Amino acid sequence: MGETDVKKRPNWLAPAIVALLAGACYYWLAGPLVQPRPEGEVVLAAGESGGGAESIEGGSASAGVGDTGGVATAAPLAAAPLADPVAMEYVAAYQQGRLDDIVRLTCWMQDRLGRLRSNSAGPEELAEAVEALEARSREQSEEGNQLREEGVEDQYVFAAGAVVEAVGMDGGRDDLERPAKDRTWVRITYPARPAALRDQDGLPIRSLVAGINVSEEGLVLKANVVGNLDIDVDSIQTHWSEPSKETGHGAGKLSEM
């Protein structure tokens, strides 16, 4: 058979060797295309960051790791609390007439009962003291339902039917009977004039903001000469959506705070 009758085989071996050599050089210089994840690394969802815990006075929020079938994912940051649960339980106790809880949560009342116990007071004497404290907490009078320079008793502020919402927290005061752990600020809005607390001029208050100082022991501290609350006098609103039939006072809308 002549040379012209022999078909040349395709030379594929040389290009394959060149490609293998090029790939090996790239891997050696750049490393593997898919990097292994370090042990314990948290995979963050889109839009999240790996920053540390966020905190505010009286509360904190931090990122955690959730279990999603073996894949670690960052849990969303918890919302910073607006209120100490003790403060809100205290509000509810007044609005719902839970007198035993009022006594249990009020620092000066617990201190008074503690002094009686340390003086070896018997069960009957302690029961009488508790009854007197509960009676004071439910007392209602027209004269008492007015804010004065020295304060006002808490049952008039947290009247039944009033809308109470937490608006923030701070570190509380350090000049009270005990240091405060935190202070919860709440806005109180009264639904109608007859049920509203009166200001120092005797006008029905539409809304105001008050602070509740809570101790490390979980007790509400006395923050005024009368009553236990810090009253933010600059927050007091006496404008109602409907003018008073008796005085004409209160025409206009309640201002935003």
Image (cartoon, helix red, strand yellow):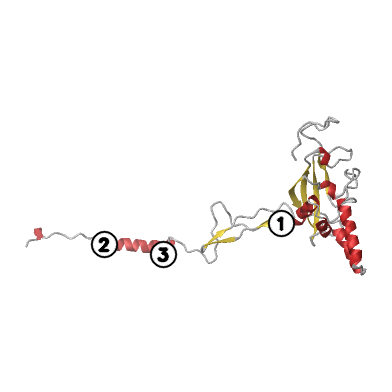
| Location of the N terminus (image quadrant) | bottom left
Can you tell which quarter of the image residue 112 is in? Answer: bottom right
For marks 3 and 2 on the same chain, the one whose residue lies earlier in the sequence: 2
Tag 1: amino acid = Gly
Callout 2 amino acid = Ala
Q: Is 33 or 17 nearer to us in this picture?
A: 33
Give whichever of discs 1 and 3 has the lower sequence position: 3
Q: Position of residue 257 (x, y in %)?
A: 75, 40
> Which residue position is annotated with label 3?
28
* Closer-to-camera residue (120/28): 120
- 9 and 55: which is toward the camera: 55
Inter-mark Cα distance, 1 to 2: 70 Å
- Label 3 crowd bin: few (<14), some (14–19), many (20+), radius 10 Å: few
Q: How crowded is mark 2: few (under 14 residues within 10 Å), some or many (20 or more)?
A: few
The answer to whether residue 132 is seen in the rendering is: yes
Residue 115: tell me if it is visible.
Answer: no
Q: Is mark 1 on a helix, strand or loop?
A: strand
Q: Label 1 vs label 3: CA separation?
A: 51 Å
- Judged from the image, the secondary structure of the residue bearing numbered disc 2 is helix
Q: Is residue 106 above or below residue 143?
A: below
The circle on residue 14 is 2
Q: Nearer the viewer, residue 12 or 199?
A: 199
Question: Residue under circle 1?
Answer: 59
Q: Which amino acid does label 3 sit on?
A: Trp
Q: Which of the 4 quarters of the picture holds residue 65?
A: bottom right
Q: Where is residue 83 in the image (x, y as percent from the top left)?
A: 74, 53
